[in-house]
Image: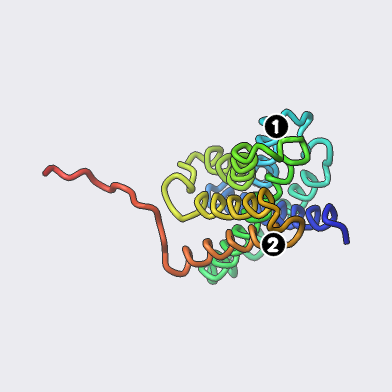
Amino acid sequence: MTTENIIFVFEMIGTIVFAVTGVITAIEKKLDIFGAVVLGMATAVGGGIIRDLILGYLPPTAFRKPVFAITAIVTSILVFTIAWYLGKRIKKHFDVYAQVINIFDSIGLAVFTIGGINAAASCGFGENSFLSIFVGILTGVGGGMLRDIMAGRIPGILKERVYALAALLGALIYQILVDYEIMSGVPAMLIGAGAILLVRALATIFRWNLPKIDELSDE
């Protein structure tokens, strides 16, 4: 299997995972099936669309290769249907499902972050490390930000969880490995993505959050 095929498989996994998180948010906000599909698709392909707009790759990949959007739509309808018929059973074990979704969400973050850096290189910006890392992170977190904004809430990455920071760390590791020719191709991708997954796992286990001010002191 070629590197391009491996990237495609990972991106499909990420698309499915992010679509699921979008539908779950839609269900929490009591949206109808159309709203769930829109939110699922926005979460799945939104980050990639923003990335392509920044890179000047038009029309964006989501429209050049509709397989990603179609996959997101089918996944959204399927998840909404399952929730419709098995809602009570799902609610009883919601904590377990939430942890599973968190794991898959981390996988999606890792896949899209590294995929975003590769997209920058494919567009001829591989030597611009700042741009590559920036669009990589944006690809990873952009869909989730769109999801939260459309659902009427502050994006999670701005107030909780070590999320964007994990993407930054993984993107930096991957870019350093490639820039200094320490490693390239699939091994470098796996290490960069692995770093993101590791940080997200540790953040979940130990409940890491970045410092924030809950209330200003009068003193």
The residue where tag 1 is placed is: 55
Place residue 129 in its image quadrant. top right
Q: How packed is label 1: few (under 14 Cα within 10 Å), some, or many (20 or more)?
A: some
Task: Mark yes or no: residue 35 visible.
Answer: no
Earlier sequence position, callout 1 versus callout 2:
1
Instruction: Name above or below for residue 200 compared with residue 138.
Output: below
- The circle drawn on residue 190 is 2
Depth check: 150 or 184 in front?
Answer: 184
Quarter the N terminus occupies? bottom right
Q: Residue at x 69, y 30 (%)?
A: 53
Q: Residue furthest right?
A: 1
Q: Residue at x 76, y 34 (%)?
A: 60
| Secondary structure under the numbered disc 2 in the rendered image | helix
User: On the rendered structure, is 161 left or right of 214?
Assistant: right
Q: Residue at x 61, y 43 (%)?
A: 133
Marks 1/2: CA–CA distance: 24 Å
User: What's the colour scheme?
Assistant: rainbow
